[in-house]
Amino acid sequence: MAHVKFTRHLVRYFPALGDNVKVNGRLVADIITELDTQYPGLAAYIVDERGALRKHVNIFVGGHLIHDRTTLQDPVQEDDQVYIFQALSGG
């Protein structure tokens, strides 16, 4: 199972996420689908209506930024650390 961590911003909207969530998935897309099954509505913060990564979100797998922001087909190994980072902006 991959270990998924989130920015505090996402945890604030989904307190049940906690510090570390374990999910199954071979691709980043699988991880997002599984997360949305466990935490309904979470995917809407991460991907757009086409399933592409939102422009203010970055995902790191094993310490490396994913390359496929459109279909999320980057591979995820069983013990990978996945970090979902949502940039914040403001004035």
Image (cartoon, helix red, strand yellow):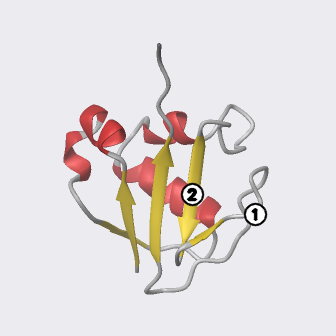
Mark 1 burial class by Cα count in 10 Å: few <14, some 14-19, many 20+: few
Image quadrant assignment for residue 19: bottom left
Residue in the foreground of this view, choosing between 43 and 11: 11
- Residue type, label 2: Ile
Q: Vertical placement of 43 versus 83: above or below?
A: above
- Residue type, label 1: His
The N terminus sits in image quarter: bottom left
Residue 77 lies, in percent from the top left, at: 55, 85
Residue located farthest toward the front when viewing the structure as drawn: 91
Find residue 20 and name its label: none
Image quadrant assignment for residue 61: bottom right
Residue located farthest toward the top when viewing the structure as drawn: 91
Per the image, the residue denoted by label 2 is 59
Q: On the rendered structure, is 87 left or right of 65?
A: left
Residue in the foreground of this view, choosing between 48 and 62: 62
| Residue depicted at x 79% and y 50% | 70
Residue 82 lies, in percent from the top left, at: 47, 68
Q: Vertical placement of 34 versus 76: above or below?
A: above
Label 1 with label 2: CB-CB less than 8 Å = no
Residue 87 lies, in percent from the top left, at: 51, 38
Per the image, the residue denoted by label 1 is 67
Q: CA distance from mark 1 to mark 2?
A: 9 Å
Residue in the foreground of this view, choosing between 46 and 85: 85
Q: Earlier in the sequence, mark 1 or mark 2?
A: 2
| Residue depicted at x 20% and y 46% | 16
Q: On the rendered structure, is 5 left or right of 16?
A: right
Q: On the rendered structure, is 60 left or right of 38?
A: right
For mark 2, give the secondary structure.
strand
For mark 1, give the secondary structure.
loop
Q: Vertical placement of 2 versus 49: above or below?
A: below
Residue in the foreground of this view, choosing between 69 and 85: 85
